[in-house]
Image (spheres, rainbow, N blue to C red):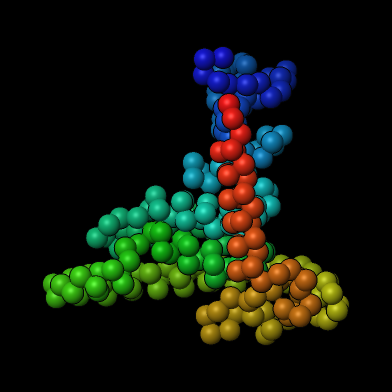
Amino acid sequence: MDAELRVEAVGPTEVLMAYQERRFGLGLADGACTELCRNPGCEGAILDEEIPFCKTHLYALDLYSLVKVAGSWAWTFHAPGEPEHSSVGRHASELMKAAVAAAAGAMVAEAIVTAAFDDPGSMEEQDVPAAYGDILRTRHAMDRERLRLWETGRREAWRLREAADGCAACHRALGWVDDGFDAGAYPAFRPGYCSSACDPLPAARERYRSAEADHSARAQLCEDIPF
């Protein structure tokens, strides 16, 4: 009780416990403790300390939460002054797959890149001639990471489009030519649709702002509740 732990469920081999938003599975036989997905009732393990969800519920996050999780995770790879060592790890592919499925590849990719590297714009404002090489190296490393994320997103979009029977709205066949990945851009519609006109999902920026407002409202509500 002093640790503010609460029991969610008890099974023959494991006890599910929670502390605030964090959830754990405690093995009764070996005492092993595994941090679980923060989605209530889920027994899947988290992907990473900064990605506290299983793969399934990562895909189910609202866009504001997905962008925040991506940025927080990428920040752990930030090596100030050493852009060559700031390349993000293996979970980038899962984040990009979730982003492409939600037609938000550009937003999530930029959240990852800007969190993992120094800001070259701020470096330029300092106007230090000796730092010119560092600025070029940083921009080069950021562009290399953007390309890697874009390629991951495009492969995932191809996979999803090949698995679909056709556009979910007009049933037109989905080909790779119209996948929206033109000139390094990301499509503004989900891979299961042939165009933005067919996809009923609002634009990514609109969904992000709506989810951000919801989170702010809930946070304000919690502050207003007297304890």
Residue 39 can be seen, yes or no: yes
Q: Measured from the top left, where is residue 72 in percent x and y?
A: 46, 51
Looking at the picture, how far across and down is residue 52, in whole percent?
A: 56, 42
The quadrant the C terminus occupies is top right
Q: Quadrant of residue 140?
A: bottom left
Q: Which image quadrant is residue 81 in?
A: bottom left
Left or right: residue 207 versus residue 32 is: right
At 62% from the left and 42% from the top, the residue drawn is: 221
> Viewer-proximal residue, 156 or 43?
43
Report the residue at 40% width, 53% height from top.
Answer: 75
Q: Nearer the viewer, residue 41 or 163?
A: 41
Q: Does residue 68 appear to the left or right of 213 in the view shown?
A: left
Q: Is residue 25 above or below residue 178?
A: above
Please indicate, yes or no, whether residue 24 appears anywhere in the rendered image. no
Q: Is residue 32 above or below residue 181?
A: above
Q: How many marks?
A: 0
**In terms of depth relative to the viewer, which is nearer, 29 or 65?**
65
Image location of residue 23, percent across then percent down: 60, 31
Q: Residue at x 52, y 15 (%)?
A: 2
Q: For the point 46% across and 73% down, which residue is it?
A: 147
Q: Quadrant of the N terminus?
A: top right
